[in-house]
Every structure is written in structure tokens, then in C-alpha cells.
């Protein structure tokens, strides 16, 4: 399983726009092949900073989503709202080593 975190800092005036994009597209992202989980976190102290936290079957599933028409719609619309560059990372989970 691949865990993906994307930290995004928005222009504070554009937070409502981002929330609207996320509400409209999250159900479709969750339906992408290999997506097992998606949630949105908002920073408790800086409400213009959000993270998406998602679980994917593997890197290939995440890459397929990133090549999809849906990503081509969501990411450019989201990027226009940024107040700073995003930061993303992926981690592997190995349940057999817990």
C-alpha cells in the first residue's frame, strides 16, 4: 500500500474555492482504480494550509490517476489557488512488518 500526503498552502482568499473543488471532485477521486482512501486535513493553526491524505494500491495506481483526465482537471484548477509551492511525499506501508 502506498500512502500519499500532499501539503498545499493556499492564498487565504481562495480557501473557499479550493474547498468547493475538493467537495466536487473527491467522490470521483475515491472511485479511481487503486484508490482505497482519501481525506482532507486542515491545519489547526493556519487554516489556509491543507493536506490530502490518500491510500493507493501501489505507485502504479497513483501514477495512473496522475495521468488521468480527472487529474488533468483537478490539479491545474487547484494550483491556480496556491499561495506557496506544494509539498508531497509517498510512503510504503508493510502490514506484515507491524
Image: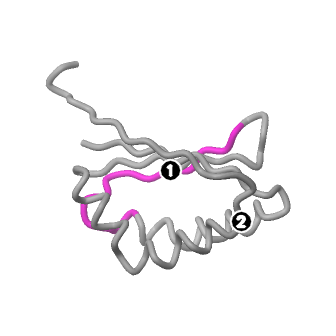
Task: Indicate which disc, 2 or 1, sits on the residue closer to the N terminus.
Answer: 1
At 64% from the left edge and 52% from the top edge, which residue is drawn?
85
Q: Residues within 10 Å of mark 2 (few under 14, many from 20)?
A: some
Residue of label 1: 39
Image point (44%, 53%), residue name:
38
Of the numbered discs in the image, which one, if any, rests on residue 29?
none
Q: Quadrant of the C terminus?
A: top left
Q: Is residue 90 highlighted in magenta?
A: no
Q: Which residues are magenta?
A: 30-43
Its colouring scheme is one colour
Q: Residue at x 61, y 74 (%)?
A: 77
Label 2: element kind: loop
Which residue is outermost to the left? 96
Query: In front: 87, or 48?
Result: 87
Residue 83 position, x and y percent, is: 75, 56
User: On the image, which quarter does residue 82 sit in?
Assistant: bottom right
**Where in the figure is residue 67, as x and y percent of width and height?**
34, 72
Image x and y of residue 74, in percent? 53, 72
Height in image: 93 above or below 73?
Answer: above
Residue named by callout 2: 81
Q: Give the x, y percent position of residue 4.
A: 40, 45
Contact between labelled residues 1 and 2, with CB atoms less than 8 Å apart: no
Place residue 65 in its image quadrant.
Answer: bottom left
**Secondary-structure class at tag 1:** strand
Left or right: residue 23 versus residue 69 is right
Label 1 crowd (10 A; few <14 / some 14-19 / many >=20): few
Hey, which residue is sitting farthest front in the picture? 85
Quadrant showing the N terminus: top left
Q: Is residue 35 magenta?
A: yes
Amino acid at each position: 500500500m502506498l500512502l500519499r500526503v500532499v501539503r498545499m498552502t493556499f492564498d487565504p482568499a481562495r480557501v473557499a474555492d479550493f474547498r468547493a473543488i475538493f467537495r466536487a471532485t473527491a467522490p470521483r477521486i475515491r472511485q479511481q482504480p487503486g484508490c482505497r482512501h482519501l481525506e482532507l486535513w486542515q491545519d489547526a493553526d493556519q487554516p489556509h494550509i491543507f493536506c490530502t491524505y490518500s491510500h493507493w494500491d501501489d505507485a502504479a495506481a497513483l501514477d495512473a490517476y496522475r495521468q488521468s483526465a480527472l487529474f488533468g482537471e483537478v490539479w491545474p484548477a487547484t494550483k491556480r489557488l496556491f499561495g506557496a509551492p506544494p509539498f508531497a511525499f509517498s510512503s510504503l506501508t508493510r502490514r506484515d512488518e507491524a
